[in-house]
Amino acid sequence: MKKLCRNQKIHAKNSNRIFIVDSLIHAGSGQGDIYKVHAGKDVYAMKLFHNGNEQKIRRQLENLTRRGRASSAFVHPLYMVNVDGNIGYIMEYIGAAQYDDGYILFNGKEKKDANGDIVREEVPFNEKIAALYHIAEAVNILYEADIALMDLKFDNVKINRRDRSVKILDTDTAVGGRTGAIVSGTVGFMPPLTMRGEEIPNRYNDSYALAVMIFMSLIGGHPLRGRAYEEPINGSPETYIFATNPVYIFNKKDQTNRPPENEKRIIARMKKYPAYFAEAMHRTFTDGIFEREKRVTPREWMEILVRLYDDHFICQHCGEEHFVGSSDKTCDVCGKPLYPPIKIICDGKSDKGIYLFNNSDIKSSELWEDSNERTIFKVVVSDFDKRYGLLLLSSQELRLELKNGQSRIFNMGETIPIFLDAVMEIDKHKINFMGGHKK
């Protein structure tokens, strides 16, 4: 396909807008090329298809343009164009200054170390969870409307550096109901039956691809790429492990495709994740590998991701993520002792208490029976000693009594220091601290 020249004029179909070519952003080897264009002061991106069924592409783009985007996460076709016989469309421009590539969730981000060398630094756990949740949320909107993106993968995701919201590209592949897809997907992100050509792409392809992205982001490898990939076979290794002989690397009944010996980190990570996460992955990549209805849905993944965030805590020595309820006494990365987060529990309550995570709110109904729910505390970090404290947000005064008998009254807006042997009394309720590490 002939490349467009700078300042070349592009006329939008069914509109009087004229777009001026600025530069080539991406010379695609697949569907098409991406250009940066502008109309006056407004900057856009333009995709031109290399080839394909022109009538089918045109119809699909017309449907998408007419339907409008379902979520701000989707970079949607705004105008159709035809340049020298090549169909394309104008869309929102996603600049590199504000967005990271989706692959940082798996590969990490490049940075310079103290010696000036380029190294890769893993994205913090909470930022991964935020981005993955936004992806699952966007996919769920289409999934529940029986619409599929068909080509969900890291390459088609951009992550906002400020708040980890996402933009999902290549929405021109989206189809609904029984409409035929213009793409089948990408190797490793499409289900085996689709890769074999035995199943027409559908919304369940997105639930499969989403699980792959979550697994790769949090565990650090592909759920099907184990020892079998390194064994000699006739033909393509990718076809063997992703299509004809797919075996989940943590399959409970089949150990033939366990992670390679040099991937012990993957085994260690999966071992420490909660059982509900492991079961969701097992369900998707064993029962759901061929039976699409058995895969974990995007909405279920949203709930699991929130639960993972609520259950995690960070090793105070190296920052590695861990989860409450784990029997691990030491961190698998730095080898130093693990101290689970402190929690508080109100007298008379039979549950396991509320963990104190930075910036979390604690409501009265979580502490005691209260029909008039209100926020009592906010977990904050003290500017003085960088330790956690409880910012009192209730109008009732609070009395903190130490083990030695000393006490102090705190009022609304003051921060209560955390002493594991202390007892807080507020609104006739006594609250105890539990867990953590006594120095």
Image: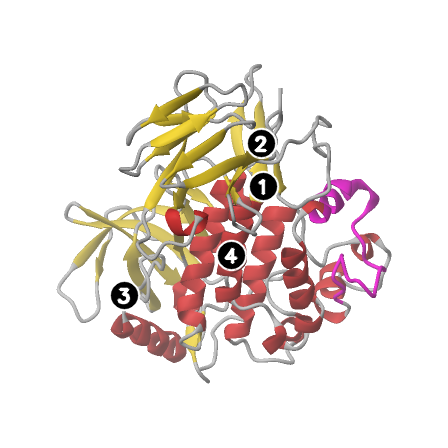
Magenta part of the chain: 246-271
- Residue beneath disc 3: 81
Q: Residues within 10 Å of mark 4 (few under 14, many from 20)?
A: few
Q: Which residue is nearer to you in this view: 363 or 267?
A: 363
Question: Contact, CB < 8 Å: mark 4 with mark 3?
Answer: no
In percent of width and height, residue 298 lies at 50, 65
Q: Which residue is nearer to you in this view: 414 or 272?
A: 414
- Spatial CA span between label 2 and label 4: 27 Å
Mark closer to the chain start, 1 or 3: 3
Question: Contact, CB < 8 Å: mark 1 with mark 2?
Answer: yes
- Spatial CA span between label 1 and label 2: 7 Å
Q: Which amino acid, mark 1?
A: Asn
Q: Which residue is nearer to you in this view: 416 or 104?
A: 416
Question: Which mark identifies residue 120?
Answer: 2
Magenta region includes residue 32 = no
Judged from the image, the secondary structure of the residue bearing numbered disc 3 is strand
Judged from the image, the secondary structure of the residue bearing numbered disc 2 is strand
Horizontal arrangement in the rendering, residue 428 relative to residue 403 (left or right): left
Q: Residues within 10 Å of mark 2 (few under 14, many from 20)?
A: few
Horizontal arrangement in the rendering, residue 44 relative to residue 284 (left or right): left
| Residue lying at 54% horizontally and 76% vertically, measured from the top left | 201
Mark closer to the chain start, 4 or 3: 4
Q: Which amino acid, mark 4?
A: Ser
- Residue beneath disc 1: 107
